[in-house]
Amino acid sequence: MVDALPNPQFEPRTLDSGRRLFAGPADFVLGAVELNQLPAGDLPEITFAGRSNVGKSSLINALTGRKALARTSVTPGRTQEINFFRLGNRLMISDLPGYGYAKAPKGKVDTWTQLIKDYLRGRPNLRRALVLIDSRHGIKDNDRHIMALLDDAAVNYQLIMTKADKIKPGELTRTHATVATEAKSHVAAHPNVLVTSSTEGWGIPEVQAALSELALTE
Ligand code: GTP
Ligand code: MG
């Protein structure tokens, strides 16, 4: 199955530097509920965005090999603030609240959505947003809104398919092709759409490798 994933080949050297980056220290910095609480922007920063329950926090845990660095939940709406994690002196990672969670109180949803949008538009050290897409569902309209916002703000982003273990390989290949075609029509989107499963570890070395290219060197 792993061999059948439609992920690009990375150079062994890049895979190795990705592995080393995520094997180093990974520490929780703070959780911000307002923009004025963000940590200093002195490191290149990567953020994990996506619909509620898509697997943002789980992917951060899988990448860092720490089971509970970022809090996850079967209930959507787990992450309620922007949580920052620091990989040594090399890279800052942020875990966003999910968007599109219809069951949360409207006031809360509006506050989160505004916080996410302000953060994505106004963080000078943000090097790339990873926009996570559930392999079972493909790109939804609220993903398109975030993609359009990132296009407008000229923030680079990369689509990452999650929960690949939940669907059959043939279906995965088809959804990947559809998602990649749509990514290519967006100016700020990275042409490579990576496929992952946090539970199976699929695609984790590739995401580590892609992020290591944005981190400060050792
Ligand atoms: P919010 O913080 O609520 O926006 O959610 P999130 O995007 O951070 O999702 P989270 O990581 O909390 O995961 C949501 C649920 O999906 C949990 O029950 C996870 O165990 C499950 N999950 C996440 N990734 C995977 C995966 O790759 N495969 C499978 N099978 N389940 C996954
Ligand atoms: Mg979360």
Image (tube, helix red, strand yellow):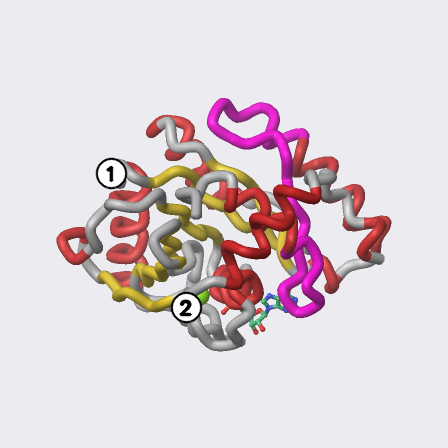
On whether ligand 1 comes within 8 Å of the CB at mark 2, the answer is: yes
Q: Taking 98 as reference, is 165 left or right? A: right
Question: Which quadrant of the render holds ligand 2?
Answer: bottom left
Q: Secondary structure at mark 1?
A: helix
> What residue is pinned by disc 1?
122
x, y percentage for residue 37?
16, 57
Q: In the rendered view of the protein, which quadrant contains the N terminus? A: bottom right
Q: Going 37% across and 55% down the picture, which residue do you hit?
A: 94
* Span of residues in magenta: 181-204
Disc 2 versus disc 1: distance between alpha carbons? 23 Å
199 in relation to 162, above or below: below
Query: Is tag 2's residue or tag 1's residue first in the polypeptide sequence?
Result: 2
Q: Going 41% across and 49% down the picture, which residue do you hit?
A: 47
- Amino acid under label 2? Gly
Magenta residue check for 156: no
On whether ligand 1 comes within 8 Å of the CB at mark 1, the answer is: no
x, y percentage for residue 60?
50, 62
- Amino acid under label 1? Gly
Q: Going 31% across and 50% down the picture, which residue do you hit?
A: 116
Q: Secondary structure at mark 2?
A: loop
